[in-house]
Amino acid sequence: MSKTWGTTDVAFLGGEPTVYPALTEITAYAFESGLQTVRIITNGTSPFLHFLNRYRYSRLPHISFSIDGATADTHEAVRGVGTFRQLLESMQAAQRRGYIISGITSIGNHNKHELPAILALANLFSLRYLTMHYVSARGNATPQMVIPPNEWLSIMRQIVELSRNFDLEIRFEQTFVPKSARLETLPSSRRICVVRSLGNLMFYPDGRVFICGLFLGQPGMHSFVWDGKRLLPNTGWSERELCKSEIP
């Protein structure tokens, strides 16, 4: 179905998608269905290494690693004891086997002090790109991690300046940034709102379909419902209605 919508890129995420035993077969099927890019977003723990050992198909998925800090203390405060070592081992293993790898970092009060080191770590592993997100209080994140919206603009400016020191593509959200303050960023920076452009769909097992990660887990805020065959609009108040207005 996704191919008929013009989709060229699919991402498997969770939770941790590599705990799903059929992920290797599903990844291969996605390629066989004509999708150009298949991405797996992983925390790089032991289930991912098991996935690498099981995967035998010629076309390799793009692997995107969640990097929550540049040190064990910071990363493991989010992911748990021993996970930083596993992350580094997984990135090395994926590189050795020829996978294209990238990174995702959610920036909050817990790791903003490590921004230079996080970029240096991504550069060390020659990541294809590093995507940096605004962290919101869901999943493993706590309210204490969330940066005030008015601080996010200064954080993004810091990212832009730091990125000039590395041969690394940086992608980040311009969340909460007024149009009058849009950054003159590097050419690789993304300036689109995926909610308004309908450029990203996130499917939940129960049929809810979200567009914006900031609304995941918020009751009733999903844009669509997937009934197994069709994508139906959510007739209630949703993320699409909330984001119709222009950013002030």
Image (tube, rainbow, N blue to C red):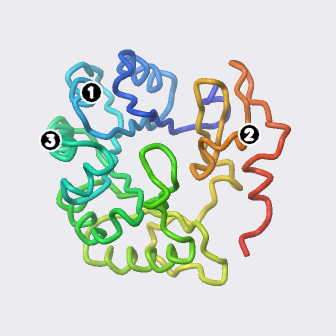
Question: Which one is nearer the viewer's eye here, 200 or 36?
Answer: 200
Rendering coords of residue 11 (x, y %)? 47, 37
* Nearer-N-terminus badge (3/1): 1
* Labels 1 and 2: the sequence-earlier one: 1
Name the side, left or right, on which 222 lies relative to 95: right
- Determine which quarter of the picture holds residue 178: bottom right
CB under 8 Å between callouts 3 and 1? no
Q: Is residue 202 left or right of residue 86?
A: right
Residue 36: image location, x then y, percent: 46, 36
Of labels 2 and 3, earlier in sequence is: 3
Q: What amino acid is labelled 1 in the image?
A: Pro
Cα separation, mark 2 vs mark 3, equals: 39 Å
Q: Which residue is tagged 3?
A: 89
Q: Distance between the residues labelled 3 and 1?
A: 12 Å
Disc 2 secondary structure class: loop
Residue tagged 2: 220
Q: What is the spatial separation of the Cα atoms under label 1 and label 2, in whole angstroms?
A: 32 Å
Outermost residue toward the right in this view: 235
**Residue at image location 17% in from the left, 35% down from the top:** 97
The one of 220 and 144 positioned closer to us in this rendering: 144
Q: Position of residue 132 (x, y in %)?
A: 42, 60
- Name the mark on residue 35: none
Q: In this view, does 60 lie above or below 214?
A: above
Name the amino acid, label 2. Gly
Residue pointed to by mark 1 = 47
Q: Where is residue 120 in the image (x, y as percent from the top left)?
A: 21, 66
Q: What element carries label 1?
A: helix
User: Residue at point 34% right, 38% down?
Assistant: 42
